[in-house]
Amino acid sequence: MRPSVAILLASALFSAASPAGAQSDAVQVSRSGRGAYEASLAPHPRGFAIAWHDTRHGLPEIHARLVDGSGRPVSQEYRLTMSAGRSYEPSLAVSRPSVSDDLVVGWYEVAADDSTSFAKVGAWTADGVPLWERTLSDPRRHGRATVVAAAGDRIQCVWIEEARESESDGSRRPAADDPRTPAEGEPSAAIWAQQLDLDGEPVGAARRIADASRTTWNLNLRVDADGVPWIAFDAQLGTRASELFVARLGRDRVTLHRLSADDGASSVYPDLAFGAGRAAVTWWDTRDGNAEVYLAVVDEEELPHGIEPVAARVSDTAGESLGAYIAWNGARFGLAWSDESEPGRPHEVYFQQFTAAGIPVRAPRRLTDNPTASLIPAIRAAGSRFALAWNEDNVNARGDHRSGGRSEVLFALVP
């Protein structure tokens, strides 16, 4: 792919020299000085809210900041979590943007002794004042991959629970009458969901949504035009490799559907978005022998019947393409992803617009061009444009998952 260049950002974050013609259209949101990763982005009455996990205090904790509609910071950076453990991968929502600017954040926390992990959710004011916090997962199981979304006057929470090693081999299990006890032969990982009211109190019991795999690392949660939550994920469940699934979380029942064919090639990390009566799904796939980004767009009511007949490859580079996310904006949508154009080169952020029929509006555009790796772009509608947030990772200073390396979070508007 030979994309046109929209935002050529040569990052000054790590003292890299700017190439000729570079434009600094992106705004640095975090001032970590250490490692800021996994940006989450949500519309907010003041513009946008951005959350990430950050190692500036030694261990990963969740931080957040508000920016206005142009990306200019309008708040300080707030440290939201202050636990003895390590907090990762925030999922951000604004509970009632028309009447409130409170932030709701889901994340997972690894215990200080590494013995377990917990799926968590909490709320803070726009000034970073804590309102409430709740552990979602059963303390007898590992909890992770929490995602949250506003659904009317409720907060939809979804997460993964996984048996501890001693449970998965049957040597220690919860009591037989516990609703979270796996049946014999049941996968040791499962997706759970619970709705909370705006004060963080449960609305009904948590419910088991679907089986998952130990390799199910990512969940994406969206609410359709009727206010019904959907969860998109990948899992290897009776298939030769990981495949794509969606679950519709109806009030009375959950329906689960496999979207991708059992072709022996991994289809992973799906994102799902609804707009203009359509459902758009993106993911990355190895069916053509390389990790590439794919897209499928169907009428909303057709989504349960699968996407294979309309699946189309978006990226076409020698390196891997991954981390794809979608946002609708009226009758069109934007798709953003990270692409290693050549093996061994740092990933860059790419962007492409499509009509509601899934037809490209123009060719893919590379939004970054710098010696750091531009990773995992979050995307939302922003007036007539799209807002993106991602992290710039110094590939020469990468650390482990505990202490991190050097990375900062950036924000940009894309026409």
Image (cartoon, rainbow, N blue to C red):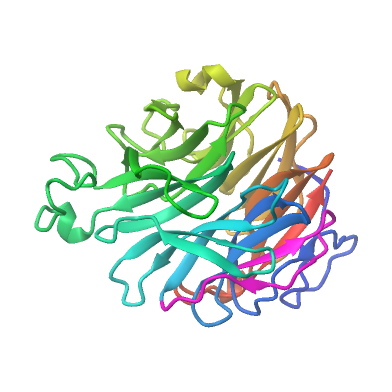
The secondary structure that dominates the magenta segment is loop
Q: Quadrant of residue 9?
A: bottom right
Residue found at x 55% / y 82%: 57
Query: Is the C terminus in the top left, top right, bottom left or bottom right quadrant?
Result: top right
Q: Is residue 138 magenta?
A: no
- Towards the viewer: 4 or 242: 242
Query: Is the N terminus in the top left, top right, bottom left or bottom right quadrant?
Result: top right
List x then y, in percent, for residue 90: 54, 59
Give the magenta range. 63-84
List x then y, in percent, for residue 86: 44, 72
Residue found at x 69% / y 58%: 49
- Towards the viewer: 8 or 191: 191
- Towards the viewer: 191 or 24: 191
343 to 18, vertically: above or below: above
85 to 297, vertically: above or below: below
Residue at the right extreme? 21
List x then y, in percent, for residue 3: 77, 43
Residue found at x 30% / y 66%: 116
One can see residue 374 in this view? yes
List x then y, in percent, for residue 43: 71, 49
One can see residue 401 in this view? no
385 left or right, relative to 123: right
287 left or right, relative to 68: left
